[in-house]
Image (cartoon, rainbow, N blue to C red):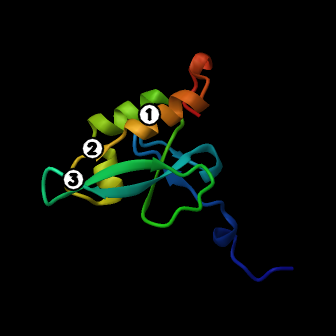
Amino acid sequence: MSDRSPDLLTPSLRTCVGCRRTERPEVLLRVVLGTQADPDSDRETYEAVPDPRRRLPGRGAWIHRTVRCVGDAERRQGFRRGFRVRGQVDTHRLQLFVAETTDERAGDRS
């Protein structure tokens, strides 16, 4: 018999940066912060990079694999909060990934 308390056996939960619902990590897509130099200025630009295998290094945020949650995260500045950055976060690559890998005909967020 284990001497661990029941609290230690509860599954970890993550919050979607779009709809703010809490889910198990298997239900959500991990997204990491990518940066690249902006050739028109001395600043870096930020990009939300999908990490479906959950292996990329860096700070991560979690989101449902739906166009709706990606849109909600953009409107509510969820990626800026999740990544703790001040600039805008480009979500173009994430939008393409979600559109290509998700069948939203069921109308379900997960």
Q: CA distance from mark 1 to mark 2?
A: 15 Å
Which quarter of the rendered picture does the N terminus lie within? bottom right
Residue 52 place in picture, x, y as percent = 59, 49
Tag 2 secondary structure: loop
The answer to whether residue 84 is left or right of residue 64 is: left
Q: Earlier in the sequence, mark 2 or mark 3?
A: 3
Residue 108 place in picture, x, y as percent = 58, 25
Tag 1 secondary structure: helix
* Residue 95 image label: 1
- Which residue type does callout 2 highlight? Gln
Q: Earlier in the sequence, mark 1 or mark 2?
A: 2
Name the residue: 38% across, 56% down: 34
Q: Which residue is identified by label 3?
A: 38
- Which residue type does callout 3 highlight? Asp
Please tell me which residue lies in front, 66 or 87: 87
Q: Which residue is identified by label 2?
A: 77
Q: Earlier in the sequence, mark 1 or mark 3?
A: 3
Q: Residues within 10 Å of mark 1 (few under 14, many from 20)?
A: some
Q: CA distance from mark 1 to mark 3?
A: 21 Å
Q: CA distance from mark 2 to mark 3?
A: 21 Å
- Which residue type does callout 1 highlight? Gln
Tag 3 secondary structure: loop
